[in-house]
Amino acid sequence: MINVRGRMRRERQPAQIDMAPMLDMVFILLIFFLVTTSFVRDAGVEVNRPSAVTAEASQQNGMRLGVDARGHIFLDGERIDLRSIRAVVERFLARNPEGSIVIVADKKVSTGLTIKVLDQCRLAGAQRIAVAAEAPGRR
């Protein structure tokens, strides 16, 4: 007679878990989160923004120009000259015609410098320009 039970014990292989489908799912989730994440570009400089009662939160993606307390202008953490703002904004608007410009100026900066930066943005053709402020009580 055939010994079926003994034969099955000899031929039995340990159970294995196939990891390929799990890895595929991990990579799909990773790609999903990378694609759907909104990357925030900051002006690259720490400023003490003035407060305004009418300040609103903005979720627009655009160019952020920073002006620190010493009057230095920054874009993406790199210091730029006032005269080069126009060319930089023109290149940005060529890539993003509906793009917005946010000027993040320290409250100790003279209004004149902020207006000069704003003027250079307008001369470059920017239509959507805002000056960042902080709502009272949000510190």
Image: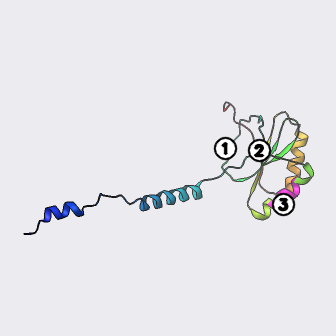
* Residue 118 is inside the magenta segment: no
Q: Could you say which quadrant of the image residue 53 lies in?
A: top right
Question: If the image is split into quadrants, where does the N terminus sit?
Answer: bottom left
In the rendered view, does 27 fall on the left or right side of 69?
left
- Going by the image, does 114 lie left or right of 24? right
Numbered disc 1: secondary structure:
loop
If you read the primary sequence from the N terminus, does the residue marked by circle 3 or circle 2 appear first? 2
- How many marks are shown on the rendered structure? 3
Q: What residue does disc 2 label?
A: 44
Residue matched to label 1: 57
Q: Is residue 12 left or right of residue 1?
A: right
Q: Amino acid at mark 2?
A: Gly
The residue positioned 90% from the left and 47% from the top of the image is 116
The residue singled out by tag 3 in the image is 90
Tell me the distance, in whole angstroms, between the alpha carbons under discs 1 and 2: 19 Å
Q: Relative to the observer, which residue lies in front, 114 or 71?
A: 71
* Residue 109 coordinates in the image, percent (x, y): 86, 36
Q: Main secondary structure of the magenta part?
A: helix
Q: Name the residue: 59% across, 59% down.
A: 35
Name the residue at 87% across, 53% down.
Answer: 85
| Residue type beneath disc 3 | Glu
Residue 32 located left or right of residue 119: left
Residue 47 in percent (x, y) is at 78, 37
Residue range of the region highlighted in magenta in the rendering: 85-91
